[in-house]
Image: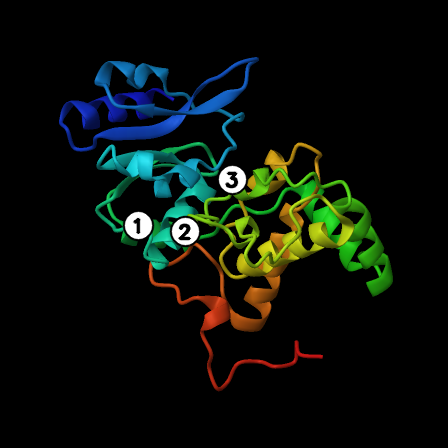
Protein backbone atom coordinates (compact mmCIF):
# COMPACT_ATOMS: atom_id res chain seq x y z
CA UNK A 1 0.00 0.00 0.00
CA UNK A 2 1.43 3.32 -1.07
CA UNK A 3 0.05 5.07 2.02
CA UNK A 4 2.19 2.88 4.28
CA UNK A 5 5.36 3.48 2.28
CA UNK A 6 4.78 7.22 2.18
CA UNK A 7 4.10 7.50 5.92
CA UNK A 8 7.05 5.25 6.82
CA UNK A 9 9.37 7.41 4.74
CA UNK A 10 8.06 10.58 6.41
CA UNK A 11 8.54 9.15 9.90
CA UNK A 12 12.10 8.02 9.19
CA UNK A 13 13.08 11.28 7.48
CA UNK A 14 11.77 13.30 10.41
CA UNK A 15 13.46 10.86 12.83
CA UNK A 16 10.14 10.43 14.59
CA UNK A 17 10.94 6.71 14.65
CA UNK A 18 14.19 4.81 14.26
CA UNK A 19 12.78 1.69 12.61
CA UNK A 20 9.60 0.63 10.82
CA UNK A 21 8.70 -3.04 11.27
CA UNK A 22 6.67 -4.35 8.37
CA UNK A 23 6.38 -6.89 5.58
CA UNK A 24 8.56 -7.32 2.52
CA UNK A 25 9.00 -9.74 -0.34
CA UNK A 26 10.66 -13.03 0.61
CA UNK A 27 11.49 -16.13 -1.39
CA UNK A 28 9.07 -18.09 -3.53
CA UNK A 29 6.37 -15.41 -3.47
CA UNK A 30 6.29 -15.55 0.32
CA UNK A 31 6.59 -12.51 2.55
CA UNK A 32 8.93 -11.90 5.46
CA UNK A 33 9.30 -9.40 8.26
CA UNK A 34 11.60 -6.50 7.39
CA UNK A 35 13.09 -3.73 9.53
CA UNK A 36 13.31 -0.46 7.63
CA UNK A 37 15.80 2.04 9.08
CA UNK A 38 16.49 4.26 6.07
CA UNK A 39 13.85 6.44 4.32
CA UNK A 40 14.90 5.16 0.90
CA UNK A 41 14.15 1.58 1.98
CA UNK A 42 10.50 2.36 2.75
CA UNK A 43 9.63 1.35 -0.81
CA UNK A 44 10.37 -2.26 0.16
CA UNK A 45 7.30 -2.35 2.41
CA UNK A 46 4.28 -4.30 1.15
CA UNK A 47 0.90 -5.31 2.48
CA UNK A 48 -1.48 -7.80 0.87
CA UNK A 49 -3.40 -10.98 1.66
CA UNK A 50 -0.13 -12.89 2.14
CA UNK A 51 0.83 -10.76 5.15
CA UNK A 52 -0.60 -12.94 7.89
CA UNK A 53 2.43 -13.27 10.21
CA UNK A 54 1.99 -11.60 13.60
CA UNK A 55 5.07 -9.38 13.47
CA UNK A 56 4.22 -8.13 16.95
CA UNK A 57 6.45 -11.01 18.07
CA UNK A 58 9.49 -8.80 17.34
CA UNK A 59 8.46 -5.98 19.69
CA UNK A 60 9.88 -7.74 22.76
CA UNK A 61 13.13 -8.83 21.09
CA UNK A 62 16.24 -7.21 22.57
CA UNK A 63 17.77 -6.70 19.12
CA UNK A 64 14.70 -4.77 17.92
CA UNK A 65 14.36 -2.70 21.08
CA UNK A 66 17.99 -1.71 20.58
CA UNK A 67 17.02 0.09 17.36
CA UNK A 68 15.07 2.70 19.35
CA UNK A 69 11.56 4.05 18.75
CA UNK A 70 9.60 1.78 16.41
CA UNK A 71 6.61 2.03 14.13
CA UNK A 72 4.90 -1.20 13.09
CA UNK A 73 2.57 -2.13 10.26
CA UNK A 74 -0.24 -3.64 12.29
CA UNK A 75 -3.13 -5.87 11.33
CA UNK A 76 -5.87 -6.29 13.95
CA UNK A 77 -4.06 -9.20 15.72
CA UNK A 78 -0.89 -7.10 15.87
CA UNK A 79 -2.87 -4.20 17.36
CA UNK A 80 -4.20 -6.54 20.04
CA UNK A 81 -0.67 -7.81 20.65
CA UNK A 82 0.53 -4.26 21.33
CA UNK A 83 -2.17 -3.61 23.91
CA UNK A 84 -1.69 -6.99 25.59
CA UNK A 85 2.07 -6.50 25.83
CA UNK A 86 1.47 -3.06 27.30
CA UNK A 87 -0.90 -4.52 29.91
CA UNK A 88 1.84 -7.00 30.87
CA UNK A 89 4.43 -4.22 31.22
CA UNK A 90 6.43 -5.39 28.21
CA UNK A 91 5.83 -2.18 26.24
CA UNK A 92 5.40 1.46 27.15
CA UNK A 93 3.19 3.76 25.15
CA UNK A 94 6.15 5.73 23.82
CA UNK A 95 7.81 2.58 22.47
CA UNK A 96 5.67 1.90 19.39
CA UNK A 97 3.71 3.91 16.82
CA UNK A 98 0.96 1.85 15.21
CA UNK A 99 0.42 2.03 11.45
CA UNK A 100 -2.81 0.09 11.44
CA UNK A 101 -4.54 -1.89 8.71
CA UNK A 102 -8.26 -2.41 9.25
CA UNK A 103 -10.13 -5.59 8.36
CA UNK A 104 -11.27 -3.77 5.21
CA UNK A 105 -7.67 -3.05 4.24
CA UNK A 106 -7.76 0.65 5.09
CA UNK A 107 -4.68 2.39 6.49
CA UNK A 108 -5.16 4.16 9.84
CA UNK A 109 -2.45 5.63 12.04
CA UNK A 110 -2.96 5.33 15.78
CA UNK A 111 -0.93 7.97 17.64
CA UNK A 112 -1.78 6.60 21.10
CA UNK A 113 -2.74 3.29 22.67
CA UNK A 114 -5.99 4.89 23.79
CA UNK A 115 -6.99 5.37 20.14
CA UNK A 116 -6.15 1.69 19.60
CA UNK A 117 -8.47 0.74 22.45
CA UNK A 118 -11.29 2.83 20.98
CA UNK A 119 -10.84 1.27 17.55
CA UNK A 120 -10.75 -2.34 18.81
CA UNK A 121 -13.82 -1.76 20.99
CA UNK A 122 -15.84 -1.85 17.75
CA UNK A 123 -14.91 -5.48 17.05
CA UNK A 124 -11.97 -7.78 16.46
CA UNK A 125 -11.01 -10.18 13.70
CA UNK A 126 -13.27 -13.27 13.75
CA UNK A 127 -12.02 -16.82 13.45
CA UNK A 128 -11.84 -18.27 9.96
CA UNK A 129 -14.72 -20.46 8.86
CA UNK A 130 -12.49 -23.53 8.78
CA UNK A 131 -11.38 -22.91 12.38
CA UNK A 132 -14.99 -22.41 13.49
CA UNK A 133 -16.03 -25.66 11.83
CA UNK A 134 -13.20 -27.67 13.40
CA UNK A 135 -13.82 -26.15 16.85
CA UNK A 136 -17.52 -27.00 16.57
CA UNK A 137 -16.63 -30.54 15.53
CA UNK A 138 -14.32 -30.94 18.53
CA UNK A 139 -16.89 -29.43 20.93
CA UNK A 140 -19.45 -31.97 19.73
CA UNK A 141 -17.18 -34.88 20.66
CA UNK A 142 -17.51 -36.83 23.88
CA UNK A 143 -14.70 -36.46 26.42
CA UNK A 144 -13.09 -39.75 25.35
CA UNK A 145 -13.39 -38.86 21.65
CA UNK A 146 -11.83 -35.48 22.30
CA UNK A 147 -8.97 -37.06 24.23
CA UNK A 148 -8.34 -39.53 21.41
CA UNK A 149 -8.43 -36.71 18.85
CA UNK A 150 -5.84 -34.57 20.62
CA UNK A 151 -3.68 -37.54 21.59
CA UNK A 152 -3.50 -38.54 17.93
CA UNK A 153 -2.82 -35.00 16.75
CA UNK A 154 -0.20 -34.14 19.36
CA UNK A 155 1.62 -37.45 18.82
CA UNK A 156 2.82 -35.90 15.53
CA UNK A 157 4.57 -33.04 17.37
CA UNK A 158 8.35 -33.04 16.84
CA UNK A 159 9.07 -30.60 19.69
CA UNK A 160 10.58 -27.96 17.41
CA UNK A 161 8.90 -25.17 19.41
CA UNK A 162 8.03 -23.18 16.30
CA UNK A 163 4.71 -22.45 18.03
CA UNK A 164 6.56 -20.85 20.94
CA UNK A 165 8.95 -18.89 18.72
CA UNK A 166 6.16 -17.46 16.59
CA UNK A 167 3.89 -16.46 19.50
CA UNK A 168 4.16 -12.80 20.57
CA UNK A 169 2.97 -13.70 24.06
CA UNK A 170 5.71 -16.33 24.60
CA UNK A 171 8.36 -13.77 25.46
CA UNK A 172 10.07 -15.39 28.47
CA UNK A 173 13.85 -15.29 28.16
CA UNK A 174 13.94 -18.94 29.18
CA UNK A 175 10.93 -21.22 28.96
CA UNK A 176 10.37 -23.82 31.65
CA UNK A 177 10.70 -26.57 29.04
CA UNK A 178 14.33 -25.52 28.58
CA UNK A 179 15.18 -26.34 32.18
CA UNK A 180 16.72 -29.71 32.96
CA UNK A 181 17.46 -29.21 36.68
CA UNK A 182 14.70 -29.94 37.47
CA UNK A 183 13.22 -31.14 34.19
CA UNK A 184 9.52 -30.32 34.09
CA UNK A 185 8.67 -31.60 30.61
CA UNK A 186 10.46 -34.32 28.66
CA UNK A 187 12.84 -33.00 26.01
CA UNK A 188 12.26 -35.63 23.28
CA UNK A 189 8.95 -36.01 21.51
CA UNK A 190 6.87 -38.51 23.50
CA UNK A 191 3.12 -39.02 23.78
CA UNK A 192 2.82 -37.74 27.36
CA UNK A 193 5.55 -35.12 26.96
CA UNK A 194 3.83 -33.64 23.91
CA UNK A 195 0.50 -33.44 25.72
CA UNK A 196 2.18 -31.84 28.75
CA UNK A 197 3.86 -29.21 26.61
CA UNK A 198 0.83 -28.16 24.59
CA UNK A 199 -1.63 -28.16 27.49
CA UNK A 200 0.81 -26.18 29.61
CA UNK A 201 1.30 -23.65 26.84
CA UNK A 202 -2.46 -23.31 26.32
CA UNK A 203 -2.96 -22.67 30.04
CA UNK A 204 -0.19 -20.06 30.06
CA UNK A 205 -2.00 -18.28 27.21
CA UNK A 206 -5.48 -18.45 28.73
CA UNK A 207 -6.79 -14.89 28.81
CA UNK A 208 -3.66 -13.72 26.96
CA UNK A 209 -3.98 -15.20 23.46
CA UNK A 210 -4.85 -12.57 20.83
CA UNK A 211 -6.19 -15.23 18.42
CA UNK A 212 -3.73 -14.50 15.64
CA UNK A 213 -3.36 -18.22 14.86
CA UNK A 214 0.38 -17.84 14.24
CA UNK A 215 1.31 -20.95 16.25
CA UNK A 216 -0.85 -23.12 14.00
CA UNK A 217 0.52 -21.55 10.82
CA UNK A 218 4.11 -21.96 12.03
CA UNK A 219 3.72 -25.66 12.87
CA UNK A 220 5.74 -27.69 10.32
CA UNK A 221 3.49 -30.75 10.76
CA UNK A 222 0.22 -28.77 10.50
CA UNK A 223 -1.14 -29.43 13.99
CA UNK A 224 -4.23 -27.31 14.79
CA UNK A 225 -2.61 -26.23 18.06
CA UNK A 226 -3.97 -22.69 17.72
CA UNK A 227 -7.38 -24.15 18.54
CA UNK A 228 -6.13 -25.05 22.03
CA UNK A 229 -5.33 -21.41 22.80
CA UNK A 230 -8.51 -20.23 21.04
CA UNK A 231 -10.53 -22.56 23.29
CA UNK A 232 -8.70 -21.38 26.41
CA UNK A 233 -9.48 -17.78 25.39
CA UNK A 234 -13.12 -18.67 24.87
CA UNK A 235 -13.33 -20.18 28.36
CA UNK A 236 -11.60 -17.13 29.87
CA UNK A 237 -14.18 -14.91 28.21
CA UNK A 238 -17.15 -17.03 29.36
CA UNK A 239 -15.99 -17.52 32.94
CA UNK A 240 -14.08 -14.32 33.65
CA UNK A 241 -15.23 -11.84 30.95
CA UNK A 242 -11.58 -11.57 29.92
CA UNK A 243 -10.67 -10.77 26.32
CA UNK A 244 -6.98 -10.24 25.58
CA UNK A 245 -5.61 -7.32 23.64
CA UNK A 246 -8.42 -4.82 24.07
CA UNK A 247 -6.99 -2.79 26.93
CA UNK A 248 -3.56 -1.55 27.96
CA UNK A 249 -4.51 -2.10 31.61
CA UNK A 250 -5.93 -5.63 31.57
CA UNK A 251 -5.25 -7.63 34.77
CA UNK A 252 -3.82 -11.13 34.44
CA UNK A 253 -6.75 -13.55 34.13
CA UNK A 254 -5.24 -16.54 35.93
CA UNK A 255 -3.57 -14.60 38.74
CA UNK A 256 -6.41 -12.22 39.59
CA UNK A 257 -8.94 -13.47 42.11
CA UNK A 258 -12.28 -11.93 43.03
CA UNK A 259 -14.81 -13.04 45.66
CA UNK A 260 -17.54 -13.21 43.00
CA UNK A 261 -15.59 -15.33 40.50
CA UNK A 262 -17.62 -18.15 39.04
CA UNK A 263 -16.69 -21.61 40.30
CA UNK A 264 -18.96 -23.72 38.13
CA UNK A 265 -15.97 -24.74 35.99
CA UNK A 266 -14.56 -26.68 38.98
CA UNK A 267 -15.70 -30.28 38.69
Mark 2 touches mark 1? (CB < 8 Å)? no
Q: Residue at x 39, y 64 (%)?
A: 250
Please say if 255 is above or below 151. below
Q: Residue furthest bottom?
A: 259
Where does the C terminus fall, quadrant-wise?
bottom right
User: Of circles 1 and 3, which is in front?
Assistant: 3
**Image spot of residue 144 (x, y percent):** 86, 62
- The residue tagged with tag 3: helix, strand or loop? helix
Q: Secondary structure at mark 1?
A: loop
Disc on the earlier residue, 2 or 1: 1
Q: Earlier in the sequence, mark 1 or mark 3?
A: 1
Residue drawn at 34 percent across, 63 percent down: 249
Q: How is the image coloured?
A: rainbow
Residue situated in front as seen by the camera: 35 or 113: 35
The residue carrying mark 3 is 165
Instruction: Classify mark 1: residues with Cα within 10 Å, few (<14), some (14-19) or many (20+).
Output: some
Q: Which residue is mark 1?
A: 91
Amino acid sequence: MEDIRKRAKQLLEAKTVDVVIGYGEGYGKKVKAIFVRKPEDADKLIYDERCTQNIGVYLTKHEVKHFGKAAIVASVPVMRTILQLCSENQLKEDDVLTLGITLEGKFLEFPTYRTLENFLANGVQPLTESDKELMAKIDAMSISERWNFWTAELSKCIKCYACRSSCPMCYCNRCMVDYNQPQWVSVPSTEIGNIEWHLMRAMHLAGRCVNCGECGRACPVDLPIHLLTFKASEEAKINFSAVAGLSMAMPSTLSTYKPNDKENFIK
